Structure formats: C-alpha cells, structure tokens
Image (cartoon, rainbow, N blue to C red):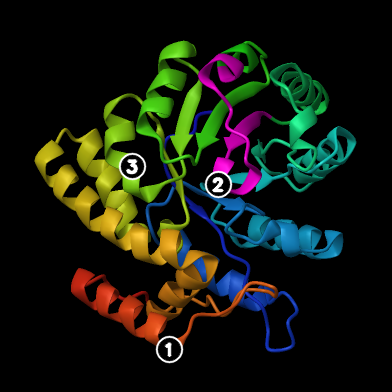
C-alpha cells in the first residue's frame, strides 16, 4: 500500500441539534472528490474523534467509504487508550473497507509508557490488524513523541508501513527518514513544514489545512514533485502563514470556519471546544481573501 501525496484530515460536521451531520460530510466529500487529494483520513484529531460515540464513529466510517471516489485512499484513526480497544477499532475499520489504520499512542498513563511498552502495544496491534498500520505521532495532544529509534524498531514489523508525524519538527522527521528503510512511508501532519519535509524524503502530508485549502496543499506537493523548488518555497511561505492562524492558533474551530468561507460545510466544533469569536472570524476572512483561493462550488 503506497501513500504519496496530500490527504485531507477530515472534519466532522454537526447539525443544529449537535448530532453528526452525515449529509454535510457527504457534501464535503463530493467537493473533495473533484480535487487531486489522494485520499482522506476519517476519525483523526481534526475529526474530533475523541468527542464521538462508538455509533457516531461507525456512521462516519460508513459514510466516508460510501461517498469517497473509488480512487481515493482511505485511512481510519483507530488509536485508543487500551490495546484491546485499538485492535477492535482497527478491525472495524477493515470491515468498512479502509486501506490502512492510523494509530496514535495511548497516553493517559504516560509515566508508565516507556519505549518498550509502546513498542509492545504497536506490535500487538499490527499483529492483529487485517490492514496495514501507520503510526501517528502527535505530541501536542498526547504528550508522547515517537522517537526515530522507536519508529525504526517498529518499521521492522511487516504490517507497520509508515508514520504520520505531526510534531512540526523537521529535524525529527529527517531522523525518522534516516533511521527507517526506503519503503517506510513518512507523512507529515503540519502544513507549515511540508516543503522541507518533502525535500528530505517525506512522501506527502495528511493535513487539516487541506480541508479548507486542498488545491493549494496539492499544488505545493506537485511543485516539489516537478522540481519547481522556487515556486514551492514561495507557496510554502503562504501555507505556513495560513496554517499558523487557521490551525495552530484557532485549531479545529478555525479549520471549520475556513471551510465555511470556501463553500464546504465546517460548522462549529463540539463542546467543550468553542466556536470562533467575531474578531477571530474577521482575521480569518481577511487572511483567506489575501490568499485569493479558488472558491469551492456547491
């Protein structure tokens, strides 16, 4: 299973009553299908997966599988606090037809999670998984960074095919690439570091920013692939500025409002996450206007 290019880390839209809005999710996927995104991640951090019920997760997995264009690759976030629950979620994703599972480390009992504990967890999940496993390092949420040595050890497992590194640390990404075999697929989760990461051997990005600006995220990848590095650097500066405000500062609420501005259905996040204030919306709108993005069509 080869993953190369840009994936959208899908958001979860909600109806006015707070329930998951599957029609809005289908609307977004219909628009994304018309772009050159290579695939989608359901139930990731941007999808507010930790705020969803099991039934909601299943409904989202089914809807994304149904609405995604046949050529798009699908990853499902399946990480949970227990190894058993992670395995169960991963098998569920396989039943829905997902191509791979994106597995974050457990983190609640962080002091107990020494490297050997995490290695045993991921290996057990990979042993039991019917589909390939991609590691997911997101220290800003879990407080746990998967080191290059740990990733290299896990890369020896035949069913662990890559990692999404969302640390934003290009040096760390380079260390992982240098420590793992060429076939091991390193994807980045920070739009601010896509160009330098691609330049040192990353395969692509799984990006929250791609939910609102898929064309620009894909354009950066294509410029690098074509060797147009000066144009790629210029676009990287633009995406870094957008990512800083929309993703880093305003988080999921910012991503969703940016989607609303561009014809997608973002809406508001689920409590306890808060929607943007009017001043924040104005700053975001001004930024998007300065980027002159192509408006998504309904």
> Image height check: is 53 above or below 273?
above
Binning the other alpha carbons within 10 Å of mark 1 as few (below 14), some (14 to 19) or many (20 upward) gives few
Q: Residue at x 31, y 76 (%)?
A: 295
Q: Which residue is drawn at 57% across and 64% down?
A: 11
Task: Give the CA distance from mark 1 to mark 2.
Answer: 26 Å
Tell me, yes or no, whether the highlighted magenta stretch contains residue 148.
yes
- Foreground tag (1 vs 3): 1
Q: Where, by quadrant of the figure, is residue 16 drawn?
A: bottom right
Q: Which mark is residue 269?
A: none
Nearer to us in this view, 2 or 237: 237
Of callouts 1 and 3, the N-terminal one: 3
The residue that label 2 is drawn on is: 140
Q: Is residue 47 left or right of residue 250?
A: right
The residue that label 3 is drawn on is: 193
SS at mark 1? helix
The residue that label 1 is drawn on is: 278
């Amino acid at each position: 299973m080869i993953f190369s290019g840009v994936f959208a880390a899908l958001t979860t839209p909600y109806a006015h009553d707070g329930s998951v809005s599957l029609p809005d999710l289908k609307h977004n996927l219909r628009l994304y299908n018309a772009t050159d995104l290579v695939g989608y991640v359901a139930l990731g951090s941007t999808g507010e997966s930790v705020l969803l019920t099991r039934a909601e997760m299943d409904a989202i997995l089914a809807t994304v599988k149904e609405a995604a264009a046949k050529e798009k690759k699908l990853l499902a976030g399946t990480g949970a606090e227990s190894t058993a629950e992670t395995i169960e979620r991963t098998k569920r994703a396989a039943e829905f037809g997902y191509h791979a599972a994106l597995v974050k480390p457990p983190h609640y009992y962080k002091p107990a999670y020494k490297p050997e504990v995490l290695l045993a967890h991921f290996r057990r999940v990979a042993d039991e998984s019917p589909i390939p496993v991609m590691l997911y390092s997101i220290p800003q949420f879990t407080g746990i960074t998967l080191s290059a040595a740990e990733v290299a050890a896990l890369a020896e497992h035949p069913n662990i095919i890559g990692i999404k590194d969302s640390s934003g640390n290009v040096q760390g990404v380079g260390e992982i690439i240098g420590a793992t075999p060429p076939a091991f697929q390193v994807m980045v989760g920070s739009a601010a570091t896509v160009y330098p990461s691609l330049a040192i051997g990353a395969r692509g990005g799984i990006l929250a920013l791609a939910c609102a600006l898929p064309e620009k995220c894909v354009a950066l990848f294509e410029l690098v692939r074509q060797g147009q590095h000066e144009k790629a650097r210029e676009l990287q500066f633009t995406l870094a500025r957008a990512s800083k405000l929309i993703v880093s500062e305003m988080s999921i609420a910012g991503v969703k409002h940016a989607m609303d501005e561009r014809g997608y259905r973002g809406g508001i996040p689920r409590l306890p996450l808060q929607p943007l204030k009017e001043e924040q919306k104005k700053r975001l709108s001004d930024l998007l206007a300065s980027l002159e993005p192509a408006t998504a069509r309904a």
